[in-house]
Amino acid sequence: MKRIEPQCSPRTRGERIYNGMPARELGSEGWHKPWSGGNGGNCLEAMKLADGRVAVRQSTDPDGPALIYTSAEMTAFIEGAKAGEADFLLS
């Protein structure tokens, strides 16, 4: 799989980035679909922020809310998913 290097958010230093903020305020550049299933491309998009946090938005609603996670939260989620801890969501 080709690795895509993250681009940081275009927001300037000092602007407040918060959980639930309108994703459009983070700009349109730098969003990536880390995976896409057989659902026609309707999935999550993620952006690495300048301070190391990760913003996540729904690809079908790019102007909707962005959920903001710390690097540690994303690491715990990804490692847990890889270990099967989220498999209950698929049944």
Image (spheres, grey):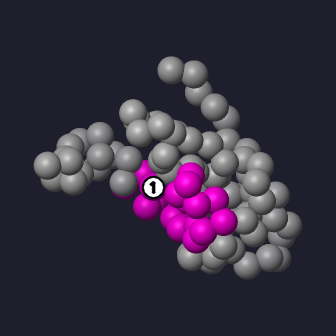
Q: Is residue 25 left or right of residue 91?
A: right
Residue denoted by label 1:
74
Q: Residues within 10 Å of mark 1 (few under 14, many from 20)?
A: some
- Magenta stretch: residue 68 in it? yes
Whether residue 52 is visible, yes or no, is no
In depth, the one of 57 and 79 nearer the eye is: 57
Residue that protrudes farthest toward the front in the picture: 40
The local secondary structure at tag 1 comes to helix
Q: Is residue 34 left or right of residue 87?
A: right
Q: Is residue 40 left or right of residue 31?
A: left
Q: Does 72 sit above or below residue 37?
A: below
Q: Does 20 sit above or below residue 36?
A: below
Estimate the x, y position of residue 23 in percent, counting from the top left: 66, 66
Estimate the x, y position of residue 39 in percent, counting from the top left: 41, 39
Q: Does 36 sit above or below residue 78?
A: above
Estimate the x, y position of residue 42 in percent, counting from the top left: 49, 46
Type of amino acid at the residue the image marks with label 1: Met
> What residue span does the magenta drawing correspond to?
56-76
In depth, the one of 56 and 69 nearer the eye is: 56
**Quadrant in which residue 55 is drawn:** bottom right
- Magenta stretch: residue 58 in it? yes
Residue drawn at x 63%, y 52% is 47
Residue drawn at x 66%, y 48% is 31
